[in-house]
């Protein structure tokens, strides 16, 4: 499993930043994803927890997978950090060529959590994605400790 984190732009310590958190859970395929998902996740531990900081108005990218199957999470904030767009791209190599499907959620309010899911073999990957604006790199980094 390879995880890649990238962001565009450089950040000064005093600049506002957008902290992106992804908690990725591998669930049995029998589990139903419904409105009580937070309760279901309390008894599960994430298999990956990528975290990154992005400059406001810039794209942040998290890629996980192998040379045959990739899941990419792309987050783009508004210039003021009040909202963000999130996309999950599922990429599978078929006959040597990449095929992809994209799921897109626009205009998510700062601080709100959204969920994506993907079937992988006999399990479900549930991705809990959140993003929040902070006034400095240090505050953004501190948010990852919680």
Image: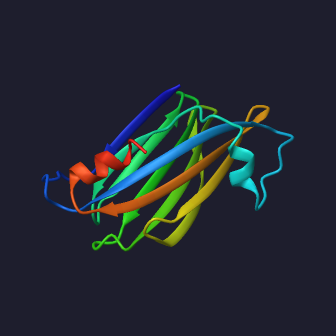
Instruction: From the viewer's perspective, tell me whether residue 124 is left or right of residue 86.
Output: right
- How many numbered discs sit on the rendered protein? 0
Query: Residue lying furthest front in this view?
Result: 146
Residue 51 on image: x %, y %: 40, 43
Give the residue displayed 64% in from the left and 39% down from the top.
Answer: 25
The scheme the figure's colours follow is rainbow
Quarter of the figure with residue 15 = bottom left
Instruction: From the viewer's perspective, tell me whether residue 36 is left or right of residue 66.
Output: right
Residue 140 on image: x %, y %: 30, 52
Residue 109 on image: x %, y %: 47, 72
Q: Nearer the viewer, residue 128 or 121?
A: 128
Give the residue displayed 31% in from the left and 46% down from the top.
Answer: 142
Q: Nearer the viewer, residue 125 or 101?
A: 125
Query: Up-down: is 98 above or below 13?
Result: above
Query: Up-down: is 96 above or below 56?
Result: above
Query: Residue lying furthest right in this view?
Result: 30
Residue 113 on image: x %, y %: 55, 61
Instruction: From the viewer's perspective, tell me whether residue 5 is left or right of residue 111.
Output: left
Q: Nearer the viewer, residue 82 or 107?
A: 82
Which corner quadrant holds the C terminus?
Answer: top left
Give the residue displayed 58% in from the left and 60% down from the top.
Answer: 114
Give the residue displayed 49% in from the left and 61% down from the top.
Answer: 86
Quarter of the figure with residue 62 = top left
């Amino acid at each position: 499993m390879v995880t890649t984190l990238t962001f565009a732009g450089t950040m000064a310590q005093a600049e506002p930043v957008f902290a992106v958190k992804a908690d990725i859970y591998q669930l049995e395929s029998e589990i139903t994803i419904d409105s009580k998902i937070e309760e279901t996740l309390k008894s599960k531990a994430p298999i990956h927890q990528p975290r990154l900081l992005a400059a406001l108005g810039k794209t942040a990218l998290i890629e996980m997978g192998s040379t045959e199957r990739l899941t990419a999470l792309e987050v783009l904030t508004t210039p003021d950090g009040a909202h963000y767009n999130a996309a999950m791209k599922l990429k599978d190599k078929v006959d040597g060529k990449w095929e992809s499907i994209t799921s897109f959620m626009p205009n998510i309010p700062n601080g709100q959590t959204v969920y994506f899911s993907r079937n992988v073999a006999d399990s479900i990957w549930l991705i809990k994605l959140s993003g929040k604006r902070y006034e400095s790199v240090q505050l953004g980094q501190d948010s990852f400790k919680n």
